[in-house]
Amino acid sequence: MGPTGARGTTGARGPTGPAGTAGAVAASTAATESTGSLTYVDLTTVGPTTAVTIPASGRVLVSVTAAELGNASSTACFMSFAGTGANTITPVDANALIQAGSAQQRASATAVLTGLTAGATTLTAKYKVSGGGAASCSFGNRSIMAIPLP
């Protein structure tokens, strides 16, 4: 093997790409409120709600966070989200933060949505409960975050 040749000149610098979290949005509310609804509903203080611009890729990462507390060990609490605007998104369990039991827990759930239409979409947190009898859940320190994905 022969000696290494001379180093060539450095090429021109390319353009700077967008920040990794460009377009990220978030909202929160500290209000602790309850529901006994078996279907997704708004709480007294609606949301939190945030507006995200879906990029041409049609992909967005959405995360919901709450401190959830059921009124019985057989109660499950659900926090999902709905979308309006360029996209109609129905709140579903597959996108929900789900916690069961009568011990308060704070946690998050994250979903990657694909196949969306590019444009402004408003995301609003929605809540429900499952369990027998008079099941109810309290939700506090609630937040929603959305990050457009390439």
Image: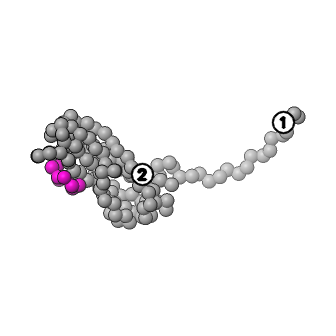
Above or below, comparing residue 21 to residue 87 in the picture? above
| Left or right for 61, reference 12 | left
Residue 91 position in % (x across, y down): 29, 56
Q: Quadrant of residue 69?
A: top left
Query: In the rendered structure, does residue 79 fall within the stretch colored magenta?
Result: no
**Residue 32 seen in the figure:** no
Q: Residue at x 71, y 51 (%)?
A: 12
Amino acid type of the residue that numbered disc 1 sits on in the rendered structure: Thr
Residue 114 position in % (x across, y down): 44, 57
Residue where numbered disc 1 is placed? 4
Q: Residue at x 18, y 40 (%)?
A: 74
Q: Which mark is residue 112?
A: 2
| Left or right for 13, reference 130 | right
Q: Looking at the image, which residue sits at the far front?
A: 132
Residue 44 position in % (x across, y down): 17, 53
Q: Which mark is residue 124?
A: none
Secondary structure category for the residue under label 1: loop
